[in-house]
Amino acid sequence: MRNPILTGKRVYLRPLEPDDARTIAEFEAQETDTTIFSGGRIPHSAIALRKLFSDAFKTMPPDTVAFAVCLKEDDTLIGQMGITGIDWVHRHGETFSHLAPGGEYRGKGFGTEAKHLLLEYAFEHIDLHVLTSWVFEQNERSAGALAKQGYKPAGRLKADGIKRGVYYDDLVFDVLR
């Protein structure tokens, strides 16, 4: 394992590194039936992601923490997840996650295990109190995963996302410490 922050049974979280940019850019470029990009798709190049990764920690304390999700058995990068919009006074933030598209890693519990590690980090290591997350209404798989991870429905944002010219509601979930 390379520079693990938290370790589970099959996956571990480590800081994103500039060398991860190419793999993450390839993940983001592949649209699946569960992805939505508000305002249209804006692909990131590996160069742009390298800059994003290096700029993320220029403010202290940072308002975003991001991790690579890797397999313990061979260090394969299978996704990214983290917390953005961290409010250090009110102790809240918004989680995000993205596993590699396709069936190789999805639906096998890797994302759930990694998200539990992220929640442990948020609540036990940086002392956050509440985390929110959102999915677009057609993404039943992600909504179900959030429920398995302890999130509860918190609201609905009407017509907040658009995909191929059709507006969709966003479902908001939260989890308290």
Image (spheres, rainbow, N blue to C red):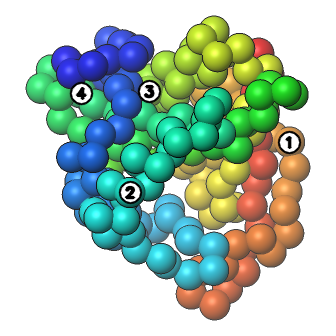
Near mark 4 (Cα within 10 A), the count class, few <14, some 14-19 or many ≥20, is many
The residue at 50%/64% (across/down) is: 35
Q: CA distance from mark 2 to mark 1?
A: 34 Å
Q: CA distance from mark 4 to mark 3?
A: 10 Å
Point out residue 75 in the picture as x, y percentages from the top left corner: 17, 28
Compared across the picture, whether 97 is left or right of 163 comes to left
Labels 2 and 1: the sequence-earlier one: 2
Please tell me which of labels 4 and 3 falls first in the chain: 4
Query: In this view of the protein, which residue sits in the foreground, 24 or 56?
Result: 56
Give the secondary structure at mark 2: helix
Mark 3–mark 1 distance (CA, rounded to whole Å): 22 Å
| Residue 106 sits above or below residue 43 on the image | above
Q: CA distance from mark 3 to mark 2?
A: 25 Å
Type of amino acid at the residue the image marks with label 3: Ala
Q: Dot 3 surroundings within 10 Å: few (below 14), some, or many (20 or more)?
A: many
Residue at which label 4 appears = 71
Query: Which residue lies at the image location 66% right of the left edge and 61% below the top edge?
Result: 136
Q: Amino acid at mark 2?
A: Lys
Tag of residue 51: 2
Q: Is residue 116 above or below residue 84?
A: above
- Residue at the spot 56% in from the left edge and 87% down from the top edge: 164
* Outermost residue toward the left in this view: 74
Tell which circle, 3 or 2, labels the residue nearer the N-terminal end. 2
